[in-house]
Amino acid sequence: DRVVPCSWACVTAFALKSYAPQDTPHASPVTSTKRQFQSRFDSRTMGIGSLFIVNNETESLCALKHWGATVGHVSVLEKVFASHRASVKHNLYADVLTTEGKQYCFHITRGEITYIATCETETEPLMVIEFLTQLHVVLKAYFTDVTESVLQEHHVTLYQLLDEMLDSGIPVNTHPGGLKVLVPPPNLLNRAQSVVFGHQGVLVSDQDPLKLLPLPWRSNNIKYASNEIYLDIIESIDATLDSEGRVLHSAIHGAIEVNSRLSGMPDVSLSLSNSHLIEEYSFHPSVRLSRFATDRVVSFVPADGTFTLMSYKVKAPQVKAETNSWQPKYIKQNAWQQGAVGGFNSPTTTQVPLPLYIRPQATFGSTQGRVSIVCGTKPAFEKPVESVTLEVRLPDRVTFADPSATHGLASYDDVGHSVRWMIDKFPVDKTPCLTVQVTLESYEASDLAKQGGKGSSGKAVPGEKNGRRVRLQELVDIHCNFSVSGVGVSGIKVETLQVRNEKYKPSQGVRYHTRGGRVVV
């Protein structure tokens, strides 16, 4: 359920390995592999056929481009937004893949913009999803704010970017650093040239990007008056809690965001403490994988601006360490796990401790019900928990809900049958509490809406026995998001950050953030 970003070099290497010739022993390996690779990535057999950029609020089309057969956008958009509305209604969001006749339709949503790609034949799903994700990153690097008005204002630059990023529907260049050399970003000078010379004021180079740039993600002759590099280590907690607040399952995912403003062609080396806890990692294409595999040092030539250096998953703590097991001295225990009951190696600390507690209570009758939730911070954690958002998903029988909170703001969404409770900061003198009075549809009306005990064919509905329907217990799901600044939950920290190959000494800084990922009660 988590898409791991990867470079197109990995996709190419996988394709070369998977489709190497096996039944032509007398052919040249290089020629045969190239022939198989070209036939595999032919625009008629694989690749993106059409691309649609849509405003999901007004459902209006912002841009479209076809590389294969022309596809009517009306039917595709209706299918995508119908699926999206059904997902919102049932609180089951699946915005990755849907089908439209013989078309495979991939779509992702970022803010008010939805990116939709269609393919006529079987295509690598991760390739299409990763391209749509990277397309939004490129547009954000060019325009800062990706909205319908901005895309319409810079539609010439948008279509030039699509021409450079895709060749017959196959992604070829998706790095903002290299694209900014081929397609100049919109600025005051380009706008003045566009006014004087028309749209020809925005030029696109016809040179090969590999020859034009020594590195696809970084351009030449970058100069800054003040050189600086800053890191943000952002870790999110995914956890499942029971009704009493006990953690049933948890996991930690992290990402290192880099904001680089360095002149020239610097070489950066990053050393992390407790790097042995990192698993399932993925890197930016600039990272030297062999160096990390050898001594766990992240060595790279940074891209200009903001980019994601790496993403990772943290290993779960062991249930109980052996008494004679040796541990290196550089392993530092996490303060959050040290403060938990039972100690670092206790069986009670197999799950990640959360900085807050959530205790819900719910009772439902035939036509009335009540939900109460108590939420607060644990005293063992010194850092304050901020920006807490609780989404309470109510049963389908709910027709109306009246939420009231002792602290924060609470609102009811009648379309998704959910209550949103937002707490910016927890008060010191009291514990916030949310109370929701709900009005329910009667069981008879609910059964009638579901065609009662028997359908039109006269067959009994599953779950009914001897004319009596078996009713399942109605539950309330709570999805929580929060933020804790200045602390990391895994214990992974930056030990050294060195910049070589340049004479200047840049300004450096590291910040740690902990956020709630998929926390479900």
Image (cartoon, grey):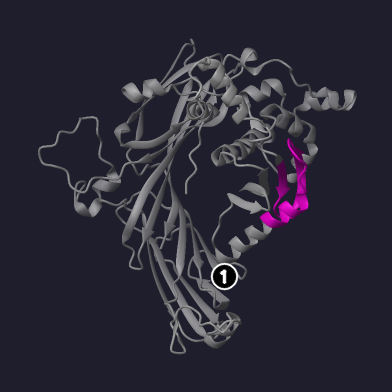
Residue reaching furthest left? 324
- Which residue is drawn at the image coordinates 62% and 63% (left, top)? 86
- Which residue is drawn at the image coordinates 23% and 45% (left, top)? 318
Magenta range is: 51-80
Report the side of 351 relative to 517 (left or right).
left
User: Can you say whether 68 is above or below 246 in the image?
Assistant: above
- The question of residue 77 being in magenta is answered with yes
Quarter where residue 132 is shown: top right
Query: What x and y, as percent, mark residue 387?
Result: 49, 54
Q: Quadrant of the C terminus?
A: bottom left
| Residue 220 visible in this rendered orientation of the protein | no
Q: Which residue is the site of mark 1?
A: 417
Report the side of 187 relative to 327 (left or right).
right
- Which residue is drawn at the image coordinates 55% and 63% (left, top)? 91
Q: Residues within 10 Å of mark 1 (few under 14, many from 20)?
A: many
- Which residue is drawn at the image coordinates 46% and 24% (left, top)? 287
The kind of residue tagged 1 is His
Residue reaching furthest bottom? 467
Quarter where residue 12 is shown: top right
User: Can you say whether 304 is above or below 423 in the image?
Assistant: above
Query: What x and y, as percent, mark residue 291?
Result: 38, 20
